[in-house]
């Protein structure tokens, strides 16, 4: 097993790793860090929760310290929340270095971002749309970028960002080092890699399952109208201290928050209808433990890295089974145990089966029984009755 010191990291970096209690590199870190330090283009398959951010942030910070050839780095991410998380990790790992970072994302004013850019930056973490806006306004120059990272590349593809990503990359020198991280490597992702990278080395971690470990996953069958009462009861009975509740829509997030408050459970909401600066304030308070329950939609909670989250509750199941994996990955962080609870109303049972296919195991034995009885019922139904 590799030790962080075996990568040849500098003393300041090793001190920070000690402070944050990272004892050993994770699998993805062990495999990618030496390649990145050697200057290779790397395509890595790693999901959130695997330590992927540190897998690129740590070697990049080391490279940025080289006074002879100080490169600049650009990290492209699909969402604002992930941008914030990634920048946070850069700041944390580089706390003993003078490193200028900036986060560029939409839904918030330009002034602060433009003035940060004017001061000069070493690392830009950006969503593609806002970055292009700023390029067009001539506020950002990508001429000095020598390290390019595409994080959650599969998600960027799914969200339709590739035309924007392509335009951004056309402004960057071909002499760069390019790193790509993706939860899944499918043919589309490989295609993108072939387009943007030079002889990439492919690294896979946890290739069997994309389901995070250490998470106790439970299912509760409940009538749609009984979800609020069950949520309050579970929060109280299980004495949940730090819960993230997912709803399918913004309106439902507001509704659930109001029901929790009415039951004297301190709750706050984050979703697309809440202004960005307000969301950030709420997240900062949640991180500090100022209230117990955060109710969120998928986009707002993506990439959240709050190690103290003990429970994730799927008030509604996600339509896309991959989102289930992302959601439950918010708990069980940094090797801590976590509990994921999913409410399943009658109309949502089919979603459980889709999720089971993605995570590769049975979540709900009841769904198997239902499946067989449903199949039997189907067989018993006279086919020609409706004709
Ligand atoms: P990520 O996959 O980048 O979202 O990281 C998942 C979580 O693992 C974050 O909370 C990191 O702070 C934590 N983490 C990353 N690397 C390590 C490590 N080597 N040891 C312990 N925790 C880590």
Image (cartoon, grey):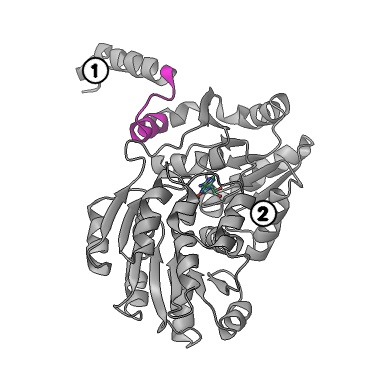
Q: Which residue is mark 1?
A: 385
Q: Which mark is residue 351?
A: none
* Residue that sits furthest to the right in the current view: 264
Indicate the secondary structure of the residue bearing disc 1: helix
Please name whichever residue, 246 or 175, is drawn nearer the observer in this view of the structure: 175
Q: Is residue 228 above or below residue 108?
A: above
Please name whichever residue, 1 or 354, is drawn nearer the observer in this view of the structure: 1
Question: Does the segment drawn in magenta span residue 356?
Answer: yes
Image quarter in which the C terminus is found: top left
Q: Which residue is mark 2?
A: 283
Question: Does the segment drawn in magenta span residue 185?
Answer: no
Label 2 CA crowd tier, 10 Å (few <14, some 14–19, many 20+): many
Residue drawn at x 37%, y 57% is 34
What residue span does the magenta drawing correspond to? 351-365
- Does any atom of ligand 1 lie closer than 8 Å to the CB of label 2? no
Label 1 CA crowd tier, 10 Å (few <14, some 14–19, many 20+): few
Q: Nearer the viewer, mark 2 or mark 1?
A: 2
Q: Can you give x and y, in whole percent of width and height, for residue 276 in the image?
A: 62, 64
User: In the figure, residue 228 lies in which quadrant?
Assistant: top right
Q: Can you give x and y, in whole percent of width and height, for residue 379 in the image?
A: 25, 14
């Amino acid at each position: 097993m590799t030790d962080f010191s075996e990568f040849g990291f500098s003393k300041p970096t090793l001190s920070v790793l000690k402070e944050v209690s990272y004892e050993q590199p994770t699998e993805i870190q062990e495999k990618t860090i030496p390649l990145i330090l050697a200057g290779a283009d790397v395509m890595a398959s790693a999901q959130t929760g695997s330590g992927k951010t540190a897998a690129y942030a740590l070697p990049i910070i080391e490279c940025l310290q080289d006074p002879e050839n100080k490169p600049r780095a650009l990290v492209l991410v699909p969402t604002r929340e992930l941008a914030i998380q990634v920048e946070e990790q850069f700041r944390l790992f580089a706390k003993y270095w003078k490193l200028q970072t900036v986060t560029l994302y939409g839904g918030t004013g330009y002034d602060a971002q433009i003035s940060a850019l004017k001061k000069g930056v070493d690392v830009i973490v950006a969503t593609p749309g806002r970055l292009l806006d700023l390029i067009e306004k001539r506020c950002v120059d990508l001429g000095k970028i020598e390290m390019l990272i595409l994080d959650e590349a599969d998600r960027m593809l799914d969200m339709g960002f590739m035309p924007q990503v392509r335009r951004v990359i056309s402004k960057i020198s071909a002499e760069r080092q390019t790193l790509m991280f993706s939860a899944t490597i499918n043919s589309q992702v490989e295609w993108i890699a072939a387009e943007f990278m030079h002889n990439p080395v492919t690294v896979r971690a946890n290739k069997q399952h994309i389901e995070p470990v250490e998470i106790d996953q439970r299912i509760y069958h409940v009538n749609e109208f009984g979800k609020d009462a069950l949520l309050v009861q579970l929060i109280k009975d299980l004495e949940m201290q730090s819960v993230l509740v997912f709803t399918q829509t913004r309106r439902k997030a507001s509704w659930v928050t109001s029901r929790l408050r009415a039951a004297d459970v301190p709750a706050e909401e984050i979703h697309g209808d809440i202004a960005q600066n307000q969301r950030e304030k709420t997240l900062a308070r949640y991180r500090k433990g100022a209230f117990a329950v955060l109710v969120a939609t998928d986009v707002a909670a993506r990439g959240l890295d709050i190690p103290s989250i003990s429970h994730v509750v799927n008030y509604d199941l996600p339509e896309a089974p991959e989102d289930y994996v992302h959601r439950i990955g918010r708990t069980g962080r940094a090797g801590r145990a976590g509990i994921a609870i999913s409410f399943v109303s009658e109309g949502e049972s089919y979603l459980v089966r889709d999720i089971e296919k993605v995570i590769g195991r049975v979540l709900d034995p009841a769904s198997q029984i239902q499946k067989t009885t449903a199949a039997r019922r189907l067989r018993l139904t006279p086919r020609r009755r409706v004709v």
